[in-house]
Image (tube, rainbow, N blue to C red):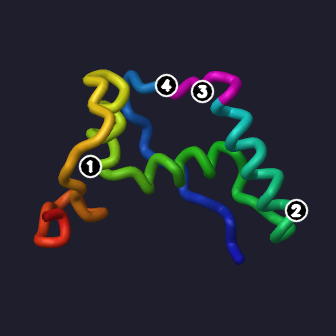
Amino acid sequence: MNLELKSPPEVEGLTVVLPPHLAEIFERADHELRERYGQSPGVAALVRMWLGYSSTTRIRREFEKAVLEIKKCNLTPNEEGDYDEDCL
């Protein structure tokens, strides 16, 4: 298994600084992966993977929770952020 990742493109003016309590989460995940599988891509790669997993819908939900203090929406879109008959 090749765990080497390509360097991501740099976004001008963007520097990510994780507070210690968040950095610890990724350090624990790195440690758990090493214990379980004997290898891990490393903390920085895990952070990039986590960011890559996000979607505009998830980002919007977190914004709504944190900034707008919206706790629960009666309609929940699917993972792609689309509302369908399952929401009703």
In x, y percent, where is residue 63? 31, 31
Q: Could you tell me which residue is drawn at 83 percent across and 60 percent down?
A: 34
Residue at mark 1 to residue at mark 3: CA–CA distance: 22 Å
Front disc: 3 or 4: 3
Q: Are marks 1 and 3 in contact (CB under 8 Å)?
A: no
Q: CA distance from mark 2 to mark 3?
A: 24 Å
Upstream in the sequence, badge 4 or badge 2?
A: 4
Q: Give the residue pinned by disc 4.
A: 15
Residue 3 in percent (x, y) is at 68, 66
- Dots 3, 4 in contact, CB < 8 A: no
Q: Alpha-carbon distance for marks 4 and 2?
A: 30 Å
Q: Amino acid at mark 4?
A: Thr
The residue identified by callout 3 is 18
Task: Say which element carries label 1.
Answer: helix
Q: Amino acid at mark 1?
A: Thr
- The front one of 65 and 35 is 65
Label 2 or label 3, whichever comes before in sequence order: 3
What's the residue at 42%, 26% (across, down)? Answer: 14
Q: Is residue 47 above or below residue 39?
A: above
Task: Mark 1 or mark 4: name the one nearer the start of the chain.
Answer: 4
Which percent across, then down, holds residue 75? 19, 53
Gap in Å between the C-alphas at discs 1 and 2? 33 Å
Q: Secondary structure at mark 3?
A: loop
Q: Identity of the amino acid at label 3?
A: Leu
Frontmost of labels 1 and 2 is: 1
- Which of label 1 and label 4 is nearer to you? 1
Principal secondary structure, stretch drawn in magenta:
loop
Q: Are marks 1 and 2 in contact (CB under 8 Å)?
A: no
Give percent across and percent down for residue 30. 76, 51
- Magenta range is 16-21
Kindly identify which residue carries mark 1: 57
